[in-house]
Amino acid sequence: MDINWYPGHMAKTRRQLSEMISRVDLMIELCDARLPYSSRNPDLDRMCRGKNRILLLNKADLADPALTSRWLSYFRSRGIEAAAIQAKQLKNKEALAAIERSTQKAVQQAAARGIRKTVRAMVVGVPNVGKSTYINQLHGGHIAQTGDRPGVTRSTQWIRVTPYLEIMDTPGLLWPRLDDQTAARRLSYLGTIRDEVLNLDDLALSLLNDLADSVPDRLMERFHVQDPDLRGPELMDAVCRGRGFLLRGNEYDYDRCCSVVLDEFREGKLGRITLEIPGED
């Protein structure tokens, strides 16, 4: 299953971001704590080179806490300021404090010249990673449009959070060619790429194989699979039997199986799972 999805508005977004980066004091990058490698856009490293940055591992409540801690150490060892968050539960003061720490030097330099500096920050990340939810928490109310599907934010917008802090909300940005098909597939597990352009049968089967390799006990418990060595179509058949996804004549209901497997993983019903380990990329 090859995945290559790059809507036209993303090319426009990339151009806009490139033009706006010079005008901001801070880049706030969000990635998904369940996929800290695959959910980071490599284009952003090149576009933001030399710019002050914070990396936030969002949806940490759905990720393995031990692996999240390892990822934070990994990023910090490479000079990247990183923190784990749950954007939906983030408190306004907590969110603002990280920005204040990261821009303190610029604010102090401006103050030394008698200027009360307005800090400008840009929030970036791949689609559906929680950027608008994070901005709403910064603002302390609903101001940026959110949704549980990719592509809700379609244009850049400046949002005044405090009298001296402005945040730019941006559309999710994928890279033009998803050459790393493992990363593309894993992003699809999370709903970063629209389900409508994917083969969900192949996607769900791939997810089941990944779960069998990384968290076999969770897979067996949730879907009542008896044999931990099953892979491929035989594994999907076992999930259909275990959860009773059957049609008339005891035929397997693959459509329902695929839908449930993807939905339950995305909602965290299999527990806190991280599919990537630092150093494996």
Image (spheres, rainbow, N blue to C red):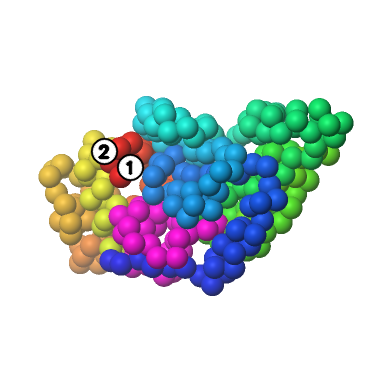
Q: Which residues are magenta?
A: 172-200
Residue placed farthest to the bottom in the image? 8
Residue named by callout 1 = 275
Secondary structure at badge 2 equals loop
For disc 1, the neighbor class at 10 Å (few under 14, some 14 to 19, many from 20) is: some
Badge 2 density bin: few <14, some 14–19, many ≥20, Cα 10 Å? some
Mark 1 is on which residue type?
A: Leu
Q: Is residue 231 above or below residue 165?
A: below
Q: Indicate the quadrant containing the N terminus: top left, top right, bottom left or bottom right.
A: bottom left
Taking the image as drawn, is residue 255 in sight?
Answer: no
Q: Left or right of 147: which side holds 200?
A: left
Residue 270 in percent (x, y) is at 35, 40
Mark toward the start of the polypeptide (1 vs 2): 2
In this view, the residue in front, 52 or 167, is: 52
Q: Quadrant of the C terminus?
A: top left
Q: Give residue 215's mark.
A: 2
Horizontal relation, residue 167 to residue 52: left or right? right
Q: CA distance from mark 1 to mark 2?
A: 9 Å
Residue 88: numbered disc: none
- Determine whether 223 is above or below 252 in the image: above
* Foreground of the two, 24 or 215: 24
Name the residue located 68 percent from the left edge and 42 percent from the top edge. 25
Q: Is residue 180 magenta?
A: yes
In the displayed structure image, the side of residue 91 where residue 281 appears, left or right: left
Describe the element under mark 1 as helix, strand or loop.
loop
Q: Check disc 2 and give the amino acid type.
A: Val
- Say which residue appears at 72% left-offset and 44% top-offset: 120
- Residue 201 horizontal/vertical position (percent): 30, 64
Residue at left offset 59%, top offset 43%: 51
| Residue 189 falls inside the magenta stretch | yes
